[in-house]
Amino acid sequence: MPLLFPLRLALTLLCFFLLSLDRNQSAYGSSIDFSSSSSSSSFAAALETLQKQIGYQFKTIDLLKQALTHPSYSQENNRALSILGLSSAEAAASLRLLSINADASASSISSAVADASRLSTCATAGKRLGIGAIVRVASGTDASTPSVICTALRGVVGAVAVDSGSVDAAAKVFLTVYKSGLGAAVL
């Protein structure tokens, strides 16, 4: 009987420890708490700046963090959000063109979608926002490459859709961000 109490106490403490680790663990699988570090505060400031630049305030900031997380950094990354972001961008470009000209040809719509999907257009828009400086990548991965920047930006657009529950909000962000990068026919 005397041995049960220390064993029970040890199990209770272990459970408490594991639960506290789980609570402190970010959505990205890291048990490291960066909330008190200066890099965390600069990351938080960069997230705030980005939200102002895109004209959208996230209700769930973890979606924005996920959008800015490269697959090399974590299993919880921007791949799925990027797919949604690309689809939202293509839909926004098509809708914008058709709202300006309901008689637009299929080839002009296809061209607008190609412009919206182009890696160089996307990377340029992402660079203007400073995405390369805030996207989280593993060491050895170059955050300034067009594909990393573009995937993160598309992830942000997708994250807006999920956070707002609306592709319309994502389309608005897309049109705001890509404004100067797309042809006059779309904007």
Image (cartoon, helix red, strand yellow):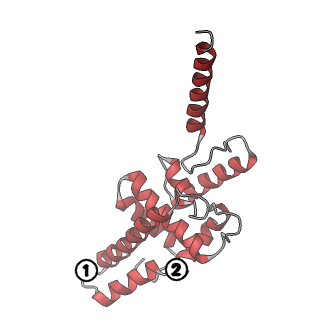
Give the Cα separation between the discs numbered 2 and 1: 27 Å
Mark 1 or mark 2, which is nearer the start of the sequence? Answer: 1
Q: Name the mark on residue 102.
A: 1
The front one of 48 and 81 is: 81
Q: Is residue 180 left or right of residue 170?
A: right
In the image, is residue 54 above or below residue 37? below
Q: Name the mark on residue 119.
A: 2
The front one of 4 and 185 is: 4
Do callouts 2 and 1 mark residues in contact (Cβ within 8 Å)? no
Residue 182 location, x and y as percent?
A: 47, 80
Query: What amino acid is found at the position of numbered circle 1 in the picture?
Result: Ala
Residue neighbourhood size for the residue with mark 2, other residues' Cα within 10 Å, grouped as few (<14), some (14–19), many (≥20)? some
Disc 2 element: helix
Work out whether residue 185 can be spotted.
no
Work out whether residue 170 can be spotted.
yes
The front one of 16 and 71 is: 16
Q: Residue at x 48, y 65 (%)?
A: 79
Q: Residue at x 56, y 51 (%)?
A: 28
In the image, is residue 49 above or below residue 22? below
